Image (tube, helix red, strand yellow):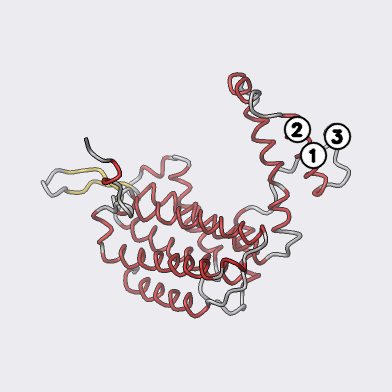
Amino acid sequence: MVDERSTVREGPNFGPYASWESVAAFSALSEQAFAAFDETVEANWKKFTRPVHHLFIRMAYQAKSTSLAVRLNTSWALLLPAFALTRVRLEQTIVSSYLMHEDESIGLEAFVRFLPIGEYKGLQAAMEDQALAKELARIVDLQESQATAAGAQDWFTPGFSLENDRFERSWTKLNLRSMAKRRDSLVRGKGFAFGENLERSYVSIYKTASSVIHADCSSLAHGYLNLYSSPSGQLVLMPVPTWAIISTSCTACYDIIQCYEILNWLGIAVSDTYLMLGRCWMAARDKYIP
């Protein structure tokens, strides 16, 4: 009998395209950004005593796992799923950065207080399906969830009543582009010049990746998919290889920004490390991206 424990790999099983020179260069920068982050967090763990500290550390975990998923998909030439995740990675960076730089009562407090409202609205929507409602009724109390959400909503709209008012649609009235624009204005001139313009990424990467995420017809066009000769000479349909460089380069940029900003927000001086990574990223961009 095969011992399953002996077959478990210590690291992810990257595919052959991880060795592309350009992909490898940007992927290495992502790995270095998170390695420096993890090492710094471990060395300073006792300083993180507030729940909000751990909220941002959890954001960093989501960033790290999403970045890995981009690189793993890219390594196996699953370039359109990787590009879709690049959009996710951008949104994570925009939201995280905005919360760290905006006034706490406008950004971070609203973000946290909205949690029970979001949970209740999701539960309420699921209850509209009879089969789901039957199962959920066994494990959740809709009335209790509603009361908790109403208490949270009272912070947004004092005097809120279930009979006369509606729950907030989101924790902020900003759409993502407005959030990116506001974030860019807040960080401009604050000493970390690398990555000052996330709105530019929104109007380019985010909007373009929407075609893949929403499965519209443009994601089937030649700009995304085309026919290429396989080693055997047979024509195969596959994503345009350029998306590999776009996804890994953008993801590396977002990784450097978010790792630096979270550590800086936590009060740990790491600017030299991440400025160096930023300079390396710009050198790789100039080398591999026309």
Disc 1 designates what residue?
Answer: 150
Question: Crowding at label 3, few (<14), some or many (≥20) Cα neighbours within 10 Å?
Answer: few
Q: Residue at x 44, y 39 (%)?
A: 215
Indicate the amino acid at tag 1.
Ala
List the single residue furthest toward the right. Answer: 159
Identify residue for label 2.
144
The amino acid on which the numbered mark 2 sits, given as a three-letter code, is Glu
Element under disc 3? loop
Relative to 168, residue 15 above or below: below
Q: Residue at horizontal 54%, vertical 64%?
A: 198
Numbered disc in front, either 3 or 2: 2
Which residue is under mark 3? 164
Along the viewing direction, whichever of 181 and 46 lies nearer the viewer: 46
Quarter of the image where one finds residue 277: bottom left
Residue 146, quarter of picture: top right
Q: Is residue 170 above or below residue 250?
A: above
